[in-house]
Image (tube, grey):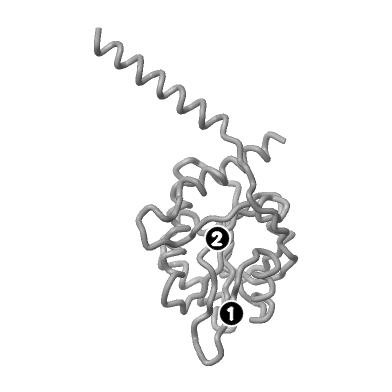
Amino acid sequence: MIKKRKHIVWLLLFTMILGACSNYKFKPTTAYEVSNFTATNHRGEEVTLESLKGKPWLAMFIFTNCTTICSPMTSNMAEIQDRLAKEGVEDYNIVAFSVDPENDSPEVLADYLERYGVADESKWQLVTGYDQKFIEQFGLNSFKTLIKKVEGDDQVMHMNTFYLVDETGVAVKNYSGYSETADGVSYDTVAIDLETLIDERLKN
């Protein structure tokens, strides 16, 4: 009898959790309109704001010669994609803007991404092909983020943020992309928000 009661309790709890997940509504916390851009991805293909429209995407700013946060950020983004892959989520892109375009050619970016063994390389767009002034202004205007190459230094200052951009090209939420603590990057939150945004778009 006790075992039967425990089974019923667990069944009720499981049903409640499923109900809570299905009723989850994505709530935007930002409304940054992404400016038009034309870039070249790590496969040598042209990428524009217009070509990305129609499905949501995750954005970040990195560079391959980075000695601090870029590698952990890329690993964390790959971990988010692992979660998306397990849930069968397909309709999205991941866009990584190089903040060091002078040194990050498409070939260099392709070699960089290959290190991470990502779940689905076709979803990734590591982009370059613009000048330093453009990416610094683009980051500030489109994502309210600071990017600055220091004179005489091979490092570029930039933030460790991930951005969720909706299918119309508006950045609707941001997250920490790097943390020195184990619980600092919310992999599941990012994945659930992206999946929910996709589901809501398909329903409309």
Residue at x-position 56% and y-position 44% = 193
Task: Decide if residue 31 is on the left or right side of residue 5.
Answer: right
Residue nearest the viewer, comparing 185 with 126: 185
Q: Residues within 10 Å of mark 1 (few under 14, many from 20)?
A: some
Percent coordinates x, y for residue 91 in the rendering: 60, 47
Query: How far is disc 1 from disc 2 in space, using C-alphas?
Result: 24 Å
Residue that numbered label 2 is attached to: 124
Residue 174, compared with residue 43, is above or below; it is above
State which quarter of the image contains the N terminus: top left
Percent coordinates x, y for residue 174 in the rendering: 57, 55
Which label was assigned to residue 85? none
State which quarter of the image contains the C terminus: top right
Residue 179, compared with residue 2, is above or below; it is below
Residue 93 seen in the current view? no
Badge count: 2
Q: Secondary structure at mark 1?
A: strand
Residue at x-position 49% and y-position 46% = 189
Percent coordinates x, y for residue 53 in the rendering: 71, 54
* Amino acid, disc 2: Trp
Of mark 1 and mark 2, the one earlier in the sequence is: 2
* Amino acid, disc 1: Lys
Q: Secondary structure at mark 2?
A: strand
Task: Decide if residue 96 is on the left or right side of residue 184.
Answer: right
Residue at x-position 55% and y-position 30% = 22
- The residue positioned farthest toward the left in the image shown: 2
Q: Quadrant of residue 43?
A: bottom right
Q: Nearer the viewer, mark 1 or mark 2?
A: 1
Residue at x-position 52% and y-position 43% = 192
Task: Decide if residue 141 is on the left or right side of residue 68.
Answer: right
Residue that numbered label 1 is attached to: 148
Residue 111, compared with residue 201, is above or below; it is below
